[in-house]
Image (cartoon, rainbow, N blue to C red):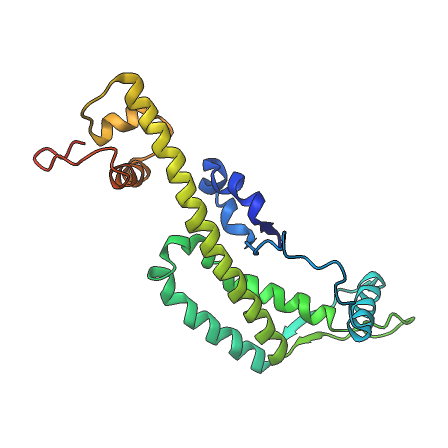
C-alpha cells in the first residue's frame, strides 16, 4: 500500500500513460493541510504509553521469522463489517463516485489489506523453538478502524482526482488556446481541435477540454453546426 502526498500527486495524475494503465487507481492519496506558519517550537512529547506500544509493535514485526506462514483470518463480526461497507460503497460507483470508480472499485480490497496490517501490528508473535504458529484474527474493532482509514483515503482521493483534474484541464485549455492562436483559427470543430492539439487522446477527452474552454469564455458554441 503506497500513499502519495499532495506535492507528488500532480505528476502522477497528469501522466496519461499512468492513468491509462490503471496506475493512478492503485495509490492511496493524502492531501493534508500544511502546518507551515503555525508550528509550535515546544510541541507535546509522545506519551509513554504510545511510545511503549509503538516499540513493542516494531520489535514484534522485526522478530517475526516464522518458517510457516501465519494466516490472517476475519472473525464473523469483522466479515459482516466489511460486507456492510462493500454494500454501502458498490452502488455509489455508478453515482457519487463514478468519476473515481477505477480507484474506489479497489477500496474494499484495500480496507481488507489494511485490516490485516492492523491485526498483525496488534499481535505479539512469540518465536519459540517448535512453537505452533497461531492464526491472526481480525476482530470487529480492528475492521472498523480499517474502514475508518478507508473513508479517510476516499475523501482524499476525491480531492486528488477532482482538484488536480481541474489543474490538468487548465493546462490542456492553455495548450489548445496556443494552438488556435498559432494557426489563427476563428472557428473549429471538435475534430479540428484534436488535429490542432494532439494531446487530446480521444473524443471524450477532447470534449472535456472543449467544454472547459467554452466555460472559460474562450469560445462560443455555434448551435447550427455545433462548431466553436
Return the x and y of residue 192 as percentages of the image width and height.
Answer: 24, 25
Q: On the rendered structure, is 43 left or right of 189?
A: right
How many discs mark residues in the rendered view? 0
Q: How far across and down, in percent of the image, does residue 20 sit?
A: 44, 40
> In the picture, residue 98 is in which quadrant?
bottom left
Q: Relative to 10, say whether 143 is above or below.
A: below
Q: In the shown orientation, is residue 62 left or right of residue 7?
A: right
Q: Residue at x 36, y 67 (%)?
A: 91
Farthest top residue in view: 183
Query: Which image quarter: residue 227?
Result: top left
| Image-quadrant location for residue 129 | bottom right
Question: x, y percentage for residue 18?
Answer: 50, 40
Q: Position of residue 56 (x, y in %)?
A: 83, 70
In this view, which residue lies farthest toward the bottom?
Answer: 77
Q: Residue at x 38, y 37 (%)?
A: 170
Q: Residue furthest right?
A: 129
The residue closer to the viewer here, 93 or 197, is 197
Quarter holding the C terminus is top left
Can residue 200 be seen here? The reply is no
In the rendered view, tell whether residue 91 sits above or below residue 18.
Answer: below
From the viewer's perspective, tell me whether residue 120 is left or right of residue 111.
right
Judging depth in this view, the residue of 194 and 17 nearest the camera is 194
Task: Give 135 or 224, whichever is nearer the viewer.
Answer: 224
> From the viewer's perspective, is residue 171 above or below residue 96?
above
The quadrant in which the N terminus is found is bottom right
Residue drawn at point x = 57 percent, y = 75 percent: 144
* One can see residue 68 in this view: yes
Residue name at image x 53 percent, y 64 percent: 152
Amino acid at each position: 500500500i503506497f500513499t502519495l502526498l499532495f506535492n507528488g500527486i500532480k505528476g502522477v495524475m497528469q501522466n496519461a500513460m499512468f492513468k491509462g494503465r490503471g496506475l493512478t487507481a492503485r495509490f492511496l492519496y493524502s492531501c493534508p493541510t500544511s502546518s507551515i506558519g503555525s508550528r509550535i517550537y515546544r510541541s507535546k512529547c509522545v506519551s509513554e504509553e504510545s511510545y511503549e506500544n509503538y516499540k513493542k509493535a516494531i520489535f514484534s514485526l522485526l522478530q517475526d521469522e516464522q518458517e510457516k506462514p501465519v494466516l490472517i483470518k476475519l472473525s464473523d463480526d469483522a466479515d459482516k463489517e466489511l460486507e456492510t461497507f462493500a454494500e454501502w460503497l458498490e452502488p455509489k460507483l455508478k453515482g457519487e463516485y463514478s468519476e473515481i470508480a477505477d480507484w474506489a472499485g479497489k477500496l474494499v480490497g484495500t480496507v481488507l489489506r489494511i485490516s490485516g496490517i492492523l491485526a498483525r501490528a496488534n499481535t505479539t508473535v512469540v518465536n519459540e523453538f517448535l512453537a505452533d504458529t497461531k492464526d491472526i484474527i481480525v476482530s470487529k474493532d480492528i475492521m472498523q478502524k480499517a474502514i475508518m482509514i478507508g473513508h479517510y483515503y476516499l475523501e482524499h482521493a476525491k480531492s486528488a482526482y477532482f482538484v488536480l483534474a481541474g489543474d490538468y484541464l487548465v493546462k490542456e485549455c492553455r495548450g489548445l488556446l496556443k494552438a488556435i492562436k498559432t494557426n489563427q483559427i476563428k472557428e473549429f470543430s471538435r475534430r479540428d481541435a484534436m488535429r490542432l492539439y494532439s494531446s487530446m487522446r480521444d473524443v471524450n477527452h477532447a470534449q472535456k477540454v472543449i467544454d472547459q474552454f467554452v466555460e472559460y469564455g474562450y469560445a462560443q458554441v455555434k448551435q447550427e453546426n455545433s462548431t466553436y
